[in-house]
Structures are given as structure tokens and as C-alpha cells.
Image: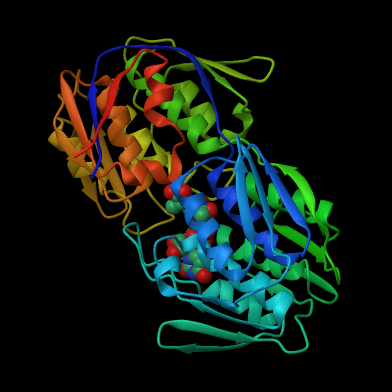
Amino acid sequence: MDKLAIIGGRPLYGIVPISGAKNSALKLMAASLLTDEEIVLENAPRLADVDMLMRLLDQHGAQSSFDGATLRLRAKDIKSTEAPYDLVRKMRASFNVLGPLLAREGKAKVSLPGGCAIGARPVDLHLQALAAMGAKIDLDEGYVIAEAPDGLHGADISFPFVSVGATEHAMLAAARAKGETHISNAACEPEIADLAECLNAMGAKVSGAGTSAIHVVGADRLSGVTHRVLPDRIETGAYAMAVGTTGGELTLANTDVELLGAALPILEKAGLSFAATDDGVKVKKERDRCLAVDIETKPYPGIATDLQAMFMAMMTTADGVSRVKETIFENRFMHAPELSRMGAKISVDGQTATVTGVERLKGAPVMATDLRASMSLVIAALGAEGQTMVNRVYHLDRGFERLEEKLAECGALIERVSE
Ligand code: EPZ
């Protein structure tokens, strides 16, 4: 298993090209099952998660290929409506093939994704939405077996709480359902608006995306499309917080800092400045040490749970005491004990972590059990004294494109070590 060896203490200077958003690309890829024409995704990130979904889509009949950052997918015919356990369990976003298969073929058998390191992550809201659209759903031996022999129909779907994945899943299915679907208490993440834009270009009529009330008029047939994947706001935040930890100044290209939502004023309060450039943003650390700031994760435009671990890493060396409250997932502090191994002072009480800033962390061997937590260890390592070995790099390969290359180009001492 590969590791990353990082020698900390060097400020970062240079340009980082921000990739297309993983969490948008995965749902846009699922949309390829809705049409027999070609979907072309520009600015698609080359990530392990994208590869894994390409494999799953391939066994459904969608051929795909990358040319640079352009991903082409075409599901001319659906070969199989079954998504096996082995491919779904490794990545929860695979579950989103259920709605498109059901809408196009009238049936699907998709493995339940199961829990993961950050929490139980059930899919009850996804199934509730599809059932409201007329799907008959059974659970058998870990699989969802769904049928809608006469196709799906529009429905009024009211989610009891905000779910990104369930909102996207409902939109995907509704785009090819008969009639109109109203989704209330919908998620407002930028990736939802990105999916709506793509579905609209394919011939569905989606309005309200980006607000909590989404309206979809389905189409009998959807066409192919060329769509540009929006920039990855979590990668944008990650590099900004790397600067917050190491100092220096980075130009983040191909991105829009407004995508950070409520995280932007928080990062400014902590001591970062942002200045718009032609195609991105310049981020600079304005203080010697960041100021400690409290955060609470919330659905968008609140502070993203996917930024929480990295924010905590930045706070480990901030001036003062910061409280970090996680409200989206029940088990998303696994990075805390690893950061403590590097000398951080963190105490966790339920959903709140209290971080007392220290002058400097010290390098150590560390590992995390999920993608964003692994990135928090990289950020901590970049600011730490001495060498840190970040184990289980495969987590990072799932969601950060060319990570060590991008960081090394800006002056970081980082190297992949294969065993
Ligand atoms: C998406 O996950 C992202 N994944 C996550 O990013 C992100 O952390 C999350 O949204 C929140 O922003 C992708 O887009 C592929 P949810 P998702 O449904 O859709 C509960 C990363 O690192 N829930 O908004 O699965 C759920 O357990 C990943 O890139 C139900 O109870 O998140 C959680 O507590 C990690 N029943 C809450 O809702 C359901 O049917 C919000 O989850 C669905 C969700």
C-alpha cells in the first residue's frame, strides 16, 4: 500500500489548478444511463472513485473513455440492470444508478451500500422518493429489488431532513418519469444545480435547483449532452486551508471561491485573505498564526462536513481554542486521535471537538479511515516539524486529483512511497 512521506514547515507558493468536482461528476455519470446518446463531461476529475463508477456503468452497458479531462459515456443499450455488491459497497455514490435504471428499464437490482467509516449512512430517503414515483421496492439478501413496469411517474416528495444523495437521486429518476415531481426540503449544494443544468441540457425541465424546492418535468426521451463539471469546492477549501496551516500564497485556478459558502467568511476570520483573479482566486495567509474560530457543519450554504477534518487540522496550530461541531455524520472525528499523535490538543465530547491551538505539530506516522480525514493529516503534516508518513494513500486517490504533484509544484516536500 502506498504512503505519502511529507516533510513539513515549508510555506506554499504557486498555482494550483482545481479539478472538476468529484461529487458532481459521479452523479453526472449516473445520468448517462438515462439516455442512449453520448454524454460528454468536460473538466472531469481522474480519480479512483470515477474509475470505479466507470467499471460499474460498463457492466450496465455504458462504455466510457477519458481523453485528458474529457470523459465520454454512452449507454446505447442497457446490458444489465443489476449492480453487484462488490462494486456498490466500495463507493456509496454507485447506489445512484438505481433510479436511472428503473426509469429507463422499469426494473433494477442494486446492492445496498452498507455503512462506512463516517457513519451508518442509510438510503431510506432514496427509496422513499423512488417509491413515491411508483416503484415497487423489495429488499432481499442485501439487495434493493425495484420494479416499475409502467415506468415512474411524477410525485410530491418531501424529505424529512436534507440529503444531498437522495435529492440527486430523486432528480435523476424524475427527469425520465411521466409528469411533474416536486421535491421539498431539497439539498441546495452547488452539485445539485450542476446536475440540474446537465439534465436540462438533456431535455428535462428542472427548476429551483439550488433552493429547497425543486420542480422537475420529466421527459420521455433524453438526449446526449456536453457538460462542464463545476469546480471542486472541497478541493478549493483544502488548498486554502493548506495555506492557512503552512503560510504562503496560492493561486487556485479554475475555481470560484463563492462555492465555499459559509466557510469563506470563517476562513477570512481565521486569517486568510481571498482575492478574485480572472479564473480563480488568490489565497494568502495574513497572520503568523491563524486565529481560533468555532464552526458547526450544516447543509449548504452552511459549512460543509467535507471540510470539517481539514479545518480541524488548521485549528491545531491556531491561536486560541476552537470548537468544531459535526452535525451531518455521527462518526466523523476519526482524524482527531491521529492529529493528537502529531501533538495536537483535541478533546472530543459527542459531536463537538475542542481544539486548543499549539505552536507547532511534530511529524509522525498516521493514517485515516476516509478521504477527507486523510487530507486533514496531509494538511497537518505540511505544517508540522519533521517527517510525517501518511498511510493508506488510496483514500486520497479517491478524491484528490494529482495531490502530491500539485503540492510539490508549490514547494511542498512530499513524495509517494510504494511498498
Ligand atoms: C454526499 O453524501 C457526499 N457524497 C458526501 O461526501 C458529503 O459528505 C455529504 O453529501 C454531505 O454533504 C457524494 O456526493 C458522493 P447525505 P450523501 O445524503 O449524499 C443521512 C466525500 O468525502 N441519510 O446528504 O451520502 C446520512 O446518513 C463524501 O466526498 C439518511 O439518514 O450525504 C447523513 O447523516 C463523504 N437517509 C445525512 O443524512 C438517507 O436516505 C446527510 O447525508 C440519506 C441520508
Residue 346 seen from this side: no
Image coords of residue 55 (percent x, y)? 51, 60
Depth check, front residue: 196 or 419: 419
Residue 222 seen from this side: yes
Depth check, front residue: 155 or 142: 142
Q: Quadrant location of residue 418? A: top left
Q: Is residue 80 left or right of residue 368?
A: right
Q: Is residue 124 left or right of residue 410?
A: right
Q: How is colour applied across the structure in the image?
A: rainbow
Image coords of residue 52 (percent x, y)? 47, 56
Q: Quadrant location of residue 232? A: top right
Question: Which residue shows up at 37% across the image and 27% down it?
Answer: 404
Question: Which residue shows up at 29% across the image and 23% down it?
Answer: 414
Image coords of residue 316 (percent x, y)? 26, 29
Say if 115 sits above or below 12 in the image.
below
Image coords of residue 305 (percent x, y)? 44, 47
Q: Quadrant of the N terminus?
A: top left
Question: Which residue shows up at 41% across the image and 14% down it?
Answer: 410
Give the total of numbered labels: 0
Depth check, front residue: 6 or 206: 6
Question: Which residue shows up at 60% across the image and 27% down it?
Answer: 257
Say if 218 sits above or below 368 in the image.
below
Q: Quadrant of the C terminus?
A: top left
Q: Is residue 338 left or right of residue 293?
A: left
